[in-house]
Image: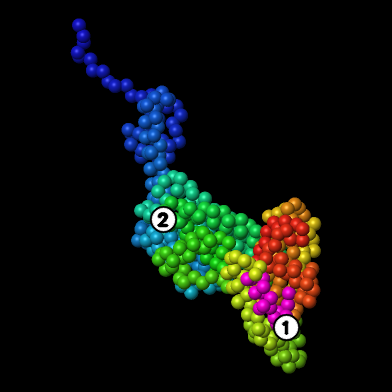
Amino acid sequence: MARTDRIVQPRAPLPSPHPPPSAAINPHLPPSVNPSLPLPPSGSWGFRRRFRHLVSIHERYLRSWVGRKPAAPADMALVLHSGSGNKNAYKALIAAEYCGVKVELTKNFEMGVSNKTPEFIKMNPLGKVPVLETPDGAVFESNAIARYVARSKGDNLLYGSSLIDYARVEQWMDFAATEVDTNLARWLYPRLGYWPYIPASEEAGIAGLKRALDALNTHLASNTFLVGHSVTLADIVMTCNLYHGFARILTKAFTSEFPHVERYFWTMVNQPNVKKVIGEVKQAEAVPAVQKKAAAPAKPKEVKKEAPKEAPKAVVETPEEEAPKPKPKNPLDLLPPSKMVLDDWKRLYSNTKSNFHEVAVKGFWNMYDPEGYSLWFCEYKYQEENTVSYVTMNKVGGFLQRMDLCRKYAFGKMLVIGSEPPFKLKGLWLFRGQEIPKFVMEEVYDMELYEWTKVDISDEAQKERVNAMIEDLEPFEGEALLDAKCFK
């Protein structure tokens, strides 16, 4: 006879001796999804179902953690300490526009003064900007500040909508900092006088930047934005870093090699939330000349010490210091007018797509004015060093970038010759005037790396060589052309 007076209690599952980390970091998971419960045998339908369920729960938890709100009151304004034109401050300000977070930019911030006060040094011991002042303390480093602002509200998509989106946003933010911003700085800051100017370092920076923009260009060929189908924090950071380059040193001649990057940048800076912070953007028209005024302050100091003895000396020194101001008048602009219009030749060269020799080459000689212009051959002095193809081509690219300051007065062709190393660098240049412009020889250090020979147009052999270089005729002097670049 069966007993009916005994109540059988269900046995509780034995606790796992090694609870998973997720159980420790997320005590708020519902009991029905307790990861410590044993899984069904692997390979069974139940196992796969339960595994997928656990993964989805943890993914949702991670998303909620990424976008969780801070403990500070949501309506409390954050204060950003920086000047109004700082591209690193733009990152947080643009993120705030997308998130609806209130960020106040400090008024009357003076670099070199405001960031040296004891109060500022307490927030950032290095005295660098920007710094974000929050109710919970200060945050410095621009990307960290932008992350804080983006995570202040959980109802935005600046970090994407999945775990992989989150990782890729972080990936492109790192790329923007280490590949784009770093190499831009190596090129721009020495030319502005902030860092010592070292030609080899600049060339490495330009090569690194081209490599980065080429990778970015490839990604953007099939993507409107960096991650997903809308603006993320990665786009904001990348745009702010590119903005610094486009506005100061990246001319159209440089960026035209990366059409998808161009499209992306102009799309981003015209987004309402971005434009509200940055305003209208104008692309740089020329690469800044190398600043050579660093040594100038030392001389006036020595003169000022003797000034009390001979007062007139101080009066004489003043106009000498101000003399460089009228330099906008280039000596080449003072030459007698030439019948050759350089822009007409450049237009003919660019627009001729067929029958090039008959149309463009012959058209050049019809336009050429030997009294107003001169032709020059150049040949690299150290051809034996050109053992790596891409390094050799980068030399040419860097040279043409630095020649940007004479674009108004010159046209050039540079050829990389040979199918095997060492490769040969040879070129043809058309300059306004009868000599190579003095300011080019002084400002472009590459000029010293080449032997320059003036073309004698009365020599038919030299004229034929000019024709071959304009036309990229191959083989050139019996050798294959590895690459040909035009400066126009």
The quarter of the picture where residue 10 lies is top left
The location of residue 83, given as percent across then percent down, is 51, 70
Per the image, the residue denoted by label 1 is 371
Q: Is residue 37 left or right of residue 112?
A: left
Mark closest to the chain's N terminus, 1 or 2: 2
Neighbor class of circle 2 (other Cα within 10 Å; few <14, some 14-19, many 20+) is few
Per the image, the residue denoted by label 2 is 230
Identity of the residue drawn at 33% across and 36% down? 30
Q: Is residue 195 above or below residue 150?
A: below
As helix, strand or loop, the secondary structure at mark 1 comes to: loop
What segment is highlighted magenta in the picture?
Answer: 359-375
Identity of the residue drawn at 37% across and 52% down? 154
Q: Contact (CB < 8 A) between labels 1 and 2?
A: no
- Amino acid carrying label 2: it is Ser
As helix, strand or loop, the secondary structure at mark 2 comes to: loop
- Amino acid carrying label 1: it is Glu
Q: Nearer the viewer, residue 155 or 488?
A: 488
Magenta highlight on residue 370: yes
Q: Is residue 357 left or right of residue 423?
A: left
Neighbor class of circle 1 (other Cα within 10 Å; few <14, some 14-19, many 20+) is some
